Image (cartoon, grey):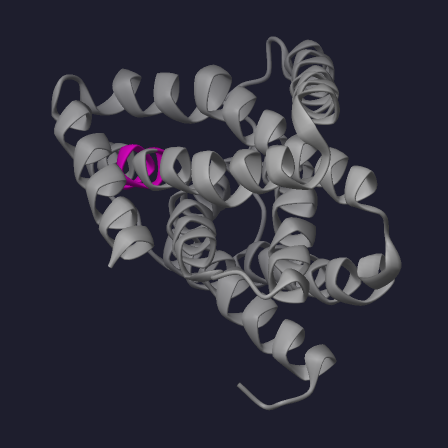
Amino acid sequence: MTGSPILDALLVGLIASSSLVIGGIVGALFDPPGRLVAVALAFASGALITALSFDLIEESFQSGGVVFSGIGMLAGAGVFVITDSLLDKYIEGAAGGVSGFAILAAVTLDGVPENMALGVSLLSGTSVLTLLIAIFASNFPEALSGAVGMKEQGRTKFFVISVWTVTALILAADVVLGSAVLSRASGEALSLLLAFAGGAVLASLADTLMPDAYREGGGLVAFATVAGFFLSFMVEKI
């Protein structure tokens, strides 16, 4: 690391969000098989399960206890479900399947608390490697599928790549925000933020990532999910 908390947070944020740019570029320039995207989504889902268990919920529980953890998780899941339902209603009947902009909104919705939690983890001095890997792994297939959806809806390649690049920069800034603004926050506030992120991530897994992965990849995604979980678990423990 650089030795500067702000620069460290910015560096970690750029690394975590860089896969959004990579996924956006690949999705804009190529037409990847749906089964490949499904496997990547499943792998990311497995990695996120480890991250939300150890780096979000466990840290939340240690900071604020069961009450704040429970409230934060319910709030995160509730916000995600409500927003996702509104998006489903908005894009209902749209041609071309799932809207690329709906995926973009979902990425931003769970990405903001995830990346702020990453900044909080840096602040607290705990290991961020598992959460960093999980965020990086989940960003790529989401950006990939979102970019493909935007392209199918008639957006130019330049537009698609630009949108995902701007999104990556915004989410990278959230890591700095989580590290700097919350530097003097109470344990209860940190607990709520971490649990909120965990609830949003868990809701997105149940509502979006895993169903989408299974729909396109079938039973193969079970093995990809296990592989993602095992890899991130080993990173956490070794």
Who's the residue at 61% across and 28% down the image? 200
Image coords of residue 20 (percent x, y): 50, 57
Q: Nearer the viewer, residue 186 or 116?
A: 186
Residue 215 visible from this viewpoint: yes
Q: Residue at x 37, y 51 (%)?
A: 137
Position of 178 compared to 114: left or right? right
Q: Name the magenta segment's main secondary structure.
A: helix
Q: Is the residue 135 above or below the residue 142 in the image? A: below
Q: Position of residue 102 (x, y in %)?
A: 62, 30
Q: Is residue 37 above or below residue 25?
A: above
Looking at the image, can residue 101 be seen? no
Q: Looking at the rendering, in which quadrant would you find the C terminus?
A: bottom left
Q: Is residue 169 left or right of residue 232?
A: right
Q: Nearer the viewer, residue 150 or 86?
A: 86
Give the quarter of the image for residue 19: bottom left
Is residue 200 covered in magenta? Answer: no
Q: Residue at x 45, y 34 (%)?
A: 53
The image quarter in which residue 195 lies: top right
Along the line of sight, the residue nearer the viewer: 22 or 227: 227
Looking at this view, is 4 or 206 the one in front? 4
Question: Residue at horizontal 67%, vertical 11%?
Answer: 85
Q: Is residue 16 left or right of residue 113?
A: left
Q: Which residues are magenta?
A: 40-45
